[in-house]
Image (cartoon, helix red, strand yellow):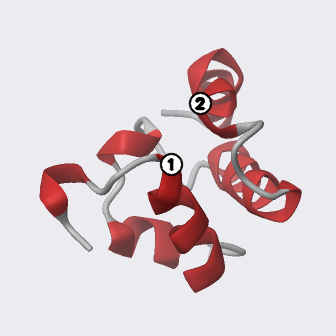
Amino acid sequence: MSEEGGLALWKKSEYAKISSQLRAHATMALGQAYRRGDFRKPLEELSDQEVLEARGCGEATLRQLRSVIPAPGGES
């Protein structure tokens, strides 16, 4: 998926899932990862490791994300 495709996915569905539920920093970090192409699938399909490998997404971002969207397959 191109950078434009990742951004389109973010704008189309992923942002709406978390925008009012996470702190602004976590939302921005995840959005930037989509824009850069670090993420190429929906949030609920991302493993913890994939989130942590994205630039700007650390433990705090992962904790906030998992408070809203559980890891696939009960990971964590």
Question: Which residue lies at the image location 49% right of the left edge and 77% below the top edge?
Answer: 52
Q: For mark 2, give the secondary structure.
A: helix
Q: Is residue 40 above or below residue 23?
A: above
Which residue carries the number 2 mark? 17
The quadrant the C terminus occupies is: bottom left
The quarter of the picture where residue 29 lies is: bottom right
The quarter of the picture where residue 66 lies is: bottom left
Residue 51: give x, y in percent of width and height.
48, 66
Front disc: 1 or 2: 1
Residue 56 disc label: none
Q: Residue furthest bottom?
A: 59
Residue 19: give x, y in percent of width and height.
75, 37
Label 1 with label 2: CB-CB less than 8 Å: yes
Q: Residue furthest left?
A: 73
Distance from label 1 to label 2 (Cα)?
A: 8 Å
Describe residue 4's horizontal placement relative to residue 76 as left or right: right
Q: Is residue 29 above or below residue 53?
A: above
Q: Is residue 49 above or below residue 19?
A: below
Callout 1 crowding tier (Cα within 10 Å): few <14, some 14–19, many ≥20: few
Which residue carries the number 1 mark? 68
Amino acid beneath label 1: Val
Q: For mark 1, give the secondary structure.
A: helix
Residue 54: give x, y in percent of width and height.
57, 70
Describe residue 68's horizontal placement relative to residue 57 as left or right: left
